[in-house]
Amino acid sequence: MYQNNCRRPALRRSYRILGAALLGLSLFASRAQAQDMAGMDHSQMEMGDSLMWMMPPHPVWMNPAMMAPFMGILPDVEPFMPGWELDIMTLPVARAPEVVELADGDTLTLDAGILHGMVGSRMLKVYGFNGQFPGPTLRVAQDATITVEFTNNIDFATTLRWHGVRLDNEFDGVPGQTQRPVRVGDTYTAQVTFPDAGAFWYHPHQRGYIAQDLGLYGAIIVDSPDPDYYAPANSEEVLILDDALMTATNWAPWGLEAPTNALMGRFGNVLMVNGKEGFRKTVDKGDVVRLFLTDASNTKNYNLRIEGDVPMKLVAGDLSRLERETMTPNVIIAPGQRYTVDARFAEVGEGNLNWPAVLAACREAEVEWYLVEQDNCYDGDPFEALATSYRNLKAMGLN
Ligand SMILES: [Cu+2]
């Protein structure tokens, strides 16, 4: 489905293949396509962990459950890293997302490119729009129609999808169905309408398991002309949650010819809010803070609460405002979803909105990659749970 017109040369590296079933690989790409890129100058390639495709880390308690023969399984792909041939010091330094206000008839230029980013202490090549990682937050008037001029300057062809926005099918960024992928260096013009108030987002729809992982996404807030659409709040924050699989110094490589993950992407070991590890905000006692939350992770769910058991009121979801608002101690959000909550800091003084702790859900686990269950507050003994499910399977004659 996607085109392998990556600018980075392929490595000739043969991995031992013991089998791929456990990894759930979707090997739908042609290896031959990627091999067309072989034979280029490899002299600039850095050595070290960034060259190797690596097994994602898994929690300590799972180690004994991993059978030895499976430990060595590696997918039969070359490693992919963004902007392979570029010197990171020559790339523009990524800025934090800026707010762009848009009214009917406006034109938005979105230039997708490779930037010099920082996540924690890691200096990384990231993807972003208009020099921002993640891309700018679009604040659009309801019922506006805008023209989007999208230029692709990342490593491979891509498209732009307007998640949740009701617009003409031909502009919805579905490669191979409603439009051709936008090739490297090309510009694509779309007419995008915003008939619904609420929170939406934009992201690539071609090799999203790489491009979206690298930060090629942004938030959209569509504002109703009705000033009372939401209840009053003292302030607003647009927060995009994401995770990424990283080593101590860089991204863990993706697969060049094919995904090394099942379905939409891989779990990360680093959690980010708006492209940074952690988010901190100072609030005054009694403030109501409106949080526009989007889960931009490829595959991770979050079970969010605010440290100090700050009450939240769920006011809107994917389909705009809720008919009935609900008080909730936590919000479970899945990839692609948006929730809008009003949090009231009645008993909390300054500095106590500690976002990493919010992400920590029921335990301090913000860097654990395995929080995959909708209820990630499991406090039991995982070995006992495993043993029980094994016994149950055995009793049913399934094992
Ligand atoms: Cu989407």
Image: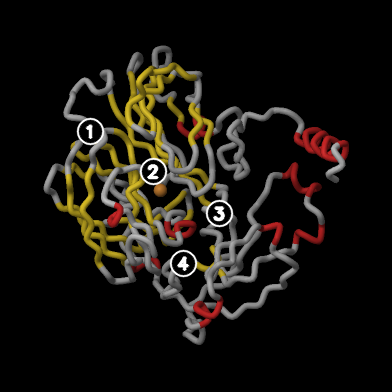
Residue at 26% from the left image edge and 33% from the top image edge: 197
Distance between mark 2 and mark 1 Cα atoms: 20 Å
Which one is in front in this view, the residue at disc 4 or the one at disc 1?
A: 4
Q: Earlier in the sequence, mark 3 or mark 4?
A: 4
Three-letter amino acid code at the position of disc 2: Asn
Residue 263 numbered tag: 3
Crowding near pointer 3: few (<14 within 10 Å), some, many (20+)?
Answer: few
Residue 274 numbered tag: 2
The chosen color scheme is: secondary structure
Which one is in front in this view, the residue at disc 2 or the one at disc 1?
A: 1
Q: Earlier in the sequence, mark 1 or mark 3?
A: 1
The residue identified by callout 1 is: 223
Distance between mark 4 and mark 2 Cα atoms: 30 Å
The residue identified by callout 4 is: 1
Residue at 13% from the left image edge and 49% from the top image edge: 106
Crowding near pointer 4: few (<14 within 10 Å), some, many (20+)?
Answer: few
Q: Against 81, is 66 above or below?
A: above
Q: Against 47, is 265 above or below?
A: above
Three-letter amino acid code at the position of disc 1: Asp
Residue 75: horizontal and vertical position, in percent? 65, 66
Q: Residue furthest left?
A: 105
Distance between mark 3 and mark 4 Cα atoms: 14 Å
Give 345 or 77, whichever is nearer the viewer.
Answer: 77
Residue at 34% from the left image edge and 24% from the top image edge: 289
Distance between mark 3 and mark 2 Cα atoms: 24 Å
Residue 178: horizontal and vertical position, in percent? 33, 60
Three-letter amino acid code at the position of disc 3: Leu
